[in-house]
Image (cartoon, grey):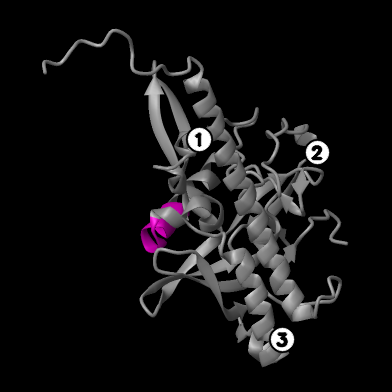
Amino acid sequence: MDNQPASRPAYTIPADLGTVTHTALDSATDARDQLGRAMVVAIAAAVRDILTGYEPDAPFDAAGLELVEAVRGPLYPTGRYWTLAGEERTFTEAVGESEAGNGIHDMSEWTVYLDDSTRYVWYPLCTELPDRDGCPAYRLDLLKAAAVPLAPPAPATPARPLSAMVDVTVCANDRDRYPAKVDPADQRDGYVRPWFDLDTVRWIAADSQAEAVRYGHGSVDTVHVLDGSVDRTAHAVVLVVSWMYLGGDKHEQATEILQPNEVGRYAVGGHDWCWYAVSDDLHPMIPFLPDGT
């Protein structure tokens, strides 16, 4: 039997398919973003609960948590953590085998959601460790995890008058410290938004690029200062690259050009980098109080 030409389309496609599809994809991305944010904060809370016996106001000392990535799977806790002073400990040593085991089991209910779908949320909070039994291992920065906003941050507000700013030394990784100006009123969960002069931005750029070479670009946002001239006038362009966003749902947010304020200072990282002020003896001041009280 000869093929007969179709007399009408076999089926029709809704005219609003494109709009509905993009809306659904945006909603799914927002949901994963919200899930990732909630889970890293929940993990920081779980560490606190293990070490305090579920007494939220009790003192405890934890700054980092080891997480291991299962083969083609999510992260899971090993029970190893680090104090603010950098001392390595285990939950078993801290609270006993039964309490540690129960706490790690409960925490695993949250870490199971830290996988490829939420990687762009949790990975920037981690430092890579040597593999464990052939599986990637990470140290989650608990201070940064606890400070992750549960909702996407609102657009940055304009800088307050320069007269409101004070000179401080700031740090974001417990190692590298830089001079900056901050507005004491412009803090999020105790973390400041520093403004750096161009020479300091070049310093940060060199450090961030060296760290990316050492730990991998996927774990470090790098800063770049591009120099050029137009009509014999020199210009500098400050660029921040969030490598983790490349190739993912947030690829359009992978690069950002920073604009200087009226005196040529740049807010590198803003609040998102969890910059904190340090005292003269290099003690973290979270929140920052100008009079040191």
Give the vertical position of 286 relative to 2 (above or below): below
How would you rate the neighbour count of disc 1 (Cα within 10 Å): few for under 14, some for 14-19, many for 20 or more? few
Residue type (three-letter) at the residue carrying disc 1: Glu
Residue drawn at (71%, 53%) of the image: 168
Residue 164 is tagged as 2
Q: Is residue 2 left or right of residue 8?
A: left
Distance, label 1 to label 2, CA atoms, is 26 Å
Q: Which residue is mark 1?
A: 256
Give the vertical position of 282 relative to 4 (above or below): below
Residue type (three-letter) at the residue carrying disc 3: Glu
Looking at the image, tell me whether mark 3 or mark 1 is earlier in sequence order.
3
In the image as oriented, which residue stretches furthest toward the left? Answer: 2
Residue 54 x, y percent position in the rendering: 81, 76
Distance, label 3 to label 2, CA atoms, is 48 Å
Q: Secondary structure at mark 1?
A: strand
Residue type (three-letter) at the residue carrying disc 2: Ala
Residue 106 x, y percent position in the rendering: 67, 73
How would you rate the neighbour count of disc 2 (Cα within 10 Å): few for under 14, some for 14-19, many for 20 or more? few
Residue drawn at (70%, 36%) of the image: 154
Residue 150 x, y percent position in the rendering: 71, 49
Is residue 185 visible in the rendered image? The answer is yes
Is residue 279 visible in the rendered image? The answer is no
Q: Specify the segment rendered in magenta.
A: 207-216
- Magenta stretch contains residue 209: yes
Distance, label 3 to label 1, CA atoms, is 45 Å
Q: Quadrant of the C terminus?
A: bottom right
Looking at the image, tell me whether mark 3 or mark 2 is earlier in sequence order.
3
User: Badges 3 and 2: C-beta atoms under 8 Å apart?
Assistant: no
Q: Which residue is mark 3?
A: 99
- Magenta stretch contains residue 15: no
